[in-house]
Amino acid sequence: MPRVQLPRDARAGPTKAEVRAVLQSKLGLTPSDHFVEVGSCTGAVTIEAARRAGRVTALERKTERAEVTRDNLAANETDAEIELRVTEAPSGLPDDADALFLGGSRNFEGVLDHAVETGIDRVVMNVSRLEVAGDATRAFRERDLLSEVVQFQVSHGYDLAGATSFDSDNPVYMLVGGTGDDGEQVAADGGTVSGRAPTEGQR
């Protein structure tokens, strides 16, 4: 799959490539999926999702960032039907999404309520601030959405006096979950999670 091209940048910058790779593995998008992103910014996540899902709806509340998303989408080959909405979540969210990604924390509780009300199978949220991660984790749990929380950090090598040293990016907290049509939690691998501890034979 070709690398994502981002000829235009935004102040917030794109979600890092390594984080996007983990995100896509958790979402498990297929050509039959309708993927929704809240806060498209540079469009990096939107582009990668549009190479996997059959339909993509991207929300961006800031007009200037939506223009960046639109220009970057035009610079990449994608197969999905894509709609870019210049609006704010949760009011601008569609009712038929299969997978949802929150790239920011603005109005996240309202977005999660929408996910529950419309039965979105897979919900992933990225957080970089510890306090917000705690609030978001509680919000996911209160709505029976949470299947796992992943915390990871990526470091990139650079040359230092003829050897390799590393610069570390900020840690990322990734909340993963969702609800199936029958109300069961959905695990990252597509299975369901009952919330009970494993039995002796399952350990």
Image: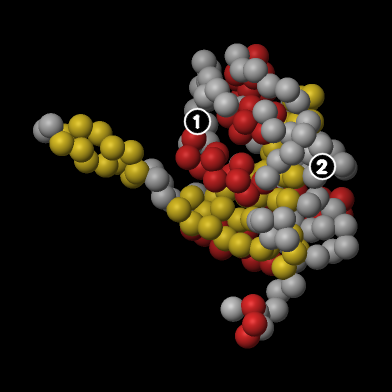
On the picture, is 31 further left or further right than 135?
Answer: right
When the figure is inspected, residue 23 is found, relative to residue 180, above or below; the finding is above
Q: Is residue 61 visible?
A: no
User: Mark 2 or 1 closer to N-term?
Assistant: 1
- Residue 103 in the image: state x and y as whole percent: 61, 42
- Residue 35 in the image: state x and y as whole percent: 75, 38
Rendered residue at 69%/60% (across/down):
187
- Residue 114 in the image: state x and y as whole percent: 81, 50
Question: Which residue in the protein does label 1 denote?
Answer: 13
Amino acid on which disc 1 is placed: Gly
When the figure is inspected, residue 181 is found, relative to residue 35, above or below; the finding is below
On the picture, is 26 further left or further right than 144?
Answer: left
* Colouring style: secondary structure
Rendered residue at 77%/34% (across/down):
31
Identity of the residue furthest to the front in this view: 201
- Residue 86 in the image: state x and y as whole percent: 74, 27
Rendered residue at 78%/52% (across/down):
121
132 or 19: which is nearer to us?
Answer: 19
Question: Which residue in the protein does label 2 denote?
Answer: 97
Q: Quadrant of the N terminus?
A: top right
Amino acid on which disc 2 is placed: Ala
- Disc 2, SS: loop
